[in-house]
Image: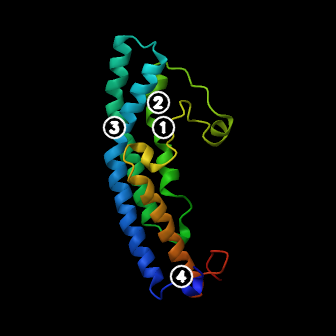
Amino acid sequence: MRDEELPPDAEARGLAMLAETGEQIVTGVAREVPGWVQAQIARILDAWGRAGAAERAEALHAAQSAGGAAAHRIGEALRALLVTDPADQRSTPLEIVRTVYREPTEVLVAAGVPPVVRDPFDERTQPDDRYDLAPRTLGDLGDAELAPLHLAWGVAKAMVLRARIRDGQMGHSGWPDL
């Protein structure tokens, strides 16, 4: 669809879709992250297989707090992104959610778990993700319905920006004309 083929109310429709998908992403992430963090810590501990019963119990107990902390931190960052005008947003919900590795990493480091062998690309793009935990999609958090929400969010953002370009509110570069 060319910009001139966008409906006249494309910006308003896109903004409404951004708000709706954004809220669904925030809600889904808040629901899924605590359990995801706990599951990842348990998975890595199981794969390592060297934690004693006391160390494992301590790490799994810490996983509960870590899951809540991650959900809170990521939720705040998502809300900050979603109240930012689409033209000023410099990240996506997935980029924010991919930082969810931080809290389980702290727990695993404290438990003495060594880093895993990772793909060289992942090492370059996520150097602090020692355990290869960063999700590839929002759906990787445990709710497959989150993945298409991220796509819908991106489509909505594109609709808003394209409508603004069409209406002369922004240059074709995506930046406001000065």
Question: Residue 102 has which mark?
Answer: 1
Q: Nearer the viewer, residue 21 or 75?
A: 21
Residue 46 on image: x %, y %: 42, 20
Residue 9 on image: x %, y %: 44, 86
Circle 2 SS class: helix
Mark 2 Cα-neighbour bin, 10 Å: few <14, some 14–19, many ≥20: some
Mark 3 Cα-neighbour bin, 10 Å: few <14, some 14–19, many ≥20: some
Which one is closest to the eye, mark 3 or mark 1?
Answer: 3
Circle 1 SS class: helix
Q: Quadrant of the N terminus?
A: bottom right
Q: Earlier in the sequence, mark 3 or mark 4?
A: 3
Residue type at tag 2: Glu
Tag 4 residue: 163
Distance from Cα at disc 3 to Cα at disc 1: 15 Å
> Would residue 85 be visible to someone looking at this image?
no
Tag 2 residue: 106
Mark 1 touching mark 4, by CB under 8 A? no
Residue type at tag 4: Ala
Tag 3 residue: 35
> Would residue 145 be visible to someone looking at this image?
yes
Q: Left or right: where does residue 17 sit relative to residue 6?
A: left
